[in-house]
Image (cartoon, grey):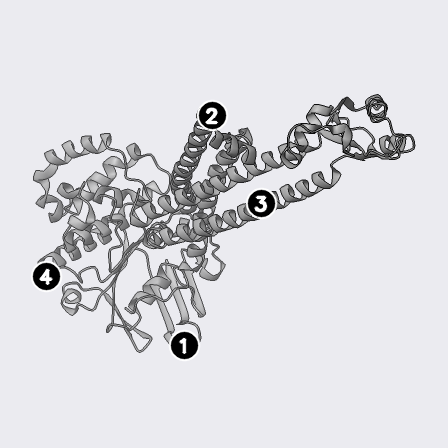
């Protein structure tokens, strides 16, 4: 066409070979695959997802344990009969046990016998104790159907007139205190999780914006070669969705690994004193399906968040690209 | 094709950089835009390219009033204008071929449909051998030609070039100028912003001189 083309006529053969090669090679992505800021973004997202998932796992663990405490305590109530003059203790125990046993919602009423009572007192009063010589109150343990608890007020009203020295303790005070404690723990856990999630959201937003800052020239070039705003936004959204998902999946996978290791450790050490202590406090270390579902949800949300942030950044960049000061020329 | 009537431009509350600019760029015309550094050549090119809006006056581009062109219409009109930036603005992670094909790619065209066109154009500007090379490896002149090829790939009706010979030696500057003349002969209107008097003397073309924010036209 011009002397420029004549200049390179001899390149035709090489050009043909290159064209064939070109056909086989995949086009470079419009947004470059990774740079330092991109790698840092993946790492930041992975760390924040890992911490968020651990917090989430811990909160579900505490919540499950709290509900177990609550149920275990409320499974039982106690009738205490104090010895008074002229009271036939055994008859009173049998009568109270019978009254309690008749109430719907009571599974069984078991009298703590003389020997068991003596054993209970042994740490304080020593062995070889004759229970009958001492004014020791006696207990009946009432086992309750948790799903259909009895009417404790009615039970109390039925027992007290017949046995004035009997007292029904439905452990309400204990249960209330434990429930309050458990709820406080769960509330604190949820607050910590909320803070963690907020920190994750902000970190992801700022890290994405940081990574986007290095891409301003690409947005500008695409804009000036006639790319539509939605095309540019889509390219960046897709790129950052993949980046975000990569980081979040790595963080989530690490958290799941920690859960699995803990649950394996807890099952391996079952019936050892350490494990029993840990189980008594935290229940089983196994994170339920809610925990794993939470991890998956978090990975998806963080990926979407990264994509949305890049989208907003592109749109903002494009909206003021045409009013920015040019270089003098 | 493009018409300016008493156009003025200022940034924010600053002084007017361009004052009462009136010009007309007809189809298939060839003109130089010149003036000292800082005179506002790039700003005037940005107005021509619809990358800035004037603070006063009327600009008509392809028969449309600039102030009535919506954001969604802009990309379509921009495809009719080719721009060669002073700093090339090639994407460094893409090969020469990919950079030149970019305007077609952003329109969603399949690579197979434009492969031959891009290859031919690259050969025409003398980059047949450097097709699969990344910009950092290219010389200043090669980058310049790649930027020109990118501006031409969509066969624009008008080509705006900002200091296209600023980074090249005089022989290559002459070759690039011949490229622009050839392009003009094929039907594209050309506006070359330059302060290279030597370059302007080689062609008998219209000269638009910017000084002190005003434009003088010498036909």
Residue assigned mark 3: A190
Alpha-carbon span between mark 3 and mark 4? 71 Å
- Mark 1 vs 4: CB contact within 8 A: no
Q: Are marks 3 and 1 on the same chain?
A: no
Q: The residue tagged with tag 2: helix, strand or loop?
A: helix
Callout 2 touching callout 1 (CB < 8 Å): no
Q: In the rendering, at what x and y percent does residue A127 appear?
A: 64, 29
Q: Earlier in the sequence, mark 1 or mark 4?
A: 1
Relative to A53, B138 lies left or right:
left
Choose between A191 and A100: the one closer to the eye.
A100
Q: Which residue is mark 2?
A: A267
**Label for residue B14?**
1
**According to the image, label 4 marks what residue?**
B170
Q: Secondary structure at mark 1?
A: loop
- State the residue in front, B58 or B86: B86
Residues at discs 2 and 1 both on one chain: no
Instruction: Check disc 4: other Cα within 10 Å, few if <14, some if 14-19, many if 20+.
Output: few
How far is mark 2 from mark 1, CA to CA?
Answer: 74 Å
Q: Position of residue A216 (x, y in %)?
A: 35, 54
Could you tell me how far apart the alpha carbons at marks 1 and 4 are, in whole angstroms?
A: 38 Å
In which chain is the residue bearing label 3?
Answer: A
């Amino acid at each position: 066409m011009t002397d420029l083309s004549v200049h390179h006529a001899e390149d035709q053969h090489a050009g043909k070979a290159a064209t064939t090669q070109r056909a086989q090679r995949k086009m470079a992505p419009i947004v470059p695959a990774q740079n330092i800021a991109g790698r840092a973004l993946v790492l930041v997202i992975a760390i924040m997802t890992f911490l968020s998932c651990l917090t989430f796992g811990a909160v579900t663990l505490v919540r499950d344990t709290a509900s177990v405490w609550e149920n275990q305590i409320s499974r039982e109530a106690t009738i205490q009969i104090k010895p008074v003059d002229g009271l036939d203790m055994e008859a009173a125990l049998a009568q109270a046990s019978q009254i309690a046993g008749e109430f719907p919602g009571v599974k069984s009423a078991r009298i703590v016998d003389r020997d068991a009572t003596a054993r209970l007192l042994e740490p304080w009063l020593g062995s070889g104790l004759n229970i009958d010589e001492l004014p020791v109150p006696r207990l009946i343990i009432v086992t309750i159907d948790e799903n259909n608890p009895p009417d404790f007020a009615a039970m109390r009203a039925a027992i007290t007139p017949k046995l004035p020295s009997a007292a029904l303790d439905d452990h309400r005070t204990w249960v209330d205190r434990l429930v309050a404690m458990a709820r406080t723990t769960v509330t604190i856990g949820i607050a910590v999780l909320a803070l963690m999630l907020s920190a994750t959201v902000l970190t992801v937003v700022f890290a994405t914006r940081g990574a986007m800052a290095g891409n301003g020239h690409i947005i500008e070039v695409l804009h000036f070669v006639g790319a539509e705003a939605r095309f540019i936004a889509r390219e960046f959204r897709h790129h950052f969705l993949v980046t975000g998902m990569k980081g979040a999946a790595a963080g989530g996978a690490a958290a799941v690994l920690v859960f699995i290791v803990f649950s394996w450790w807890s099952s391996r050490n079952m019936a050892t004193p350490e494990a029993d202590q840990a189980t008594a406090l935290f229940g089983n270390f196994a994170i339920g399906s809610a925990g794993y579902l939470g991890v998956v949800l978090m990975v998806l949300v963080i990926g979407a968040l990264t994509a949305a942030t890049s989208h907003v950044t592109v749109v903002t960049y494009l909206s003021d690209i045409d009013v920015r000061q040019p270089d003098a020329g | 094709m493009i018409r300016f009537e008493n156009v003025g431009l200022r940034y924010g509350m600053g002084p007017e950089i361009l004052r009462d600019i009136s010009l007309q760029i007809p189809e298939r015309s060839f003109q130089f835009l010149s003036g000292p550094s800082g005179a506002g050549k790039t700003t005037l090119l940005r107005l021509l390219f619809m990358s800035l809006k004037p603070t006063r006056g009327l600009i008509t581009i392809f028969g449309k009033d600039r102030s009535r062109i919506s954001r969604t219409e802009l990309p379509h009109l921009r495809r009719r204008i080719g721009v060669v930036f002073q700093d090339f603005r090639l994407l460094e992670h893409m090969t020469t071929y990919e950079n030149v094909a970019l305007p077609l790619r952003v329109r969603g065209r399949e690579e197979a449909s434009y492969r031959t066109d891009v290859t031919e154009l690259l050969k025409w500007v003398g980059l047949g051998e450097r097709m699969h090379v990344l910009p950092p490896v290219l010389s200043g002149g090669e980058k310049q030609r790649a930027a020109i090829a990118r501006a031409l790939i969509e066969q624009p009706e008008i080509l705006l070039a900002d200091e296209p010979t600023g980074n090249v030696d005089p022989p290559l500057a002459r070759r690039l100028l011949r490229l622009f003349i050839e392009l003009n002969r094929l039907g594209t209107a050309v506006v070359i912003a330059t302060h290279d008097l030597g370059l302007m003397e080689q062609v008998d073309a219209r000269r638009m001189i910017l000084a002190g924010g005003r434009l003088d036209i010498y036909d």
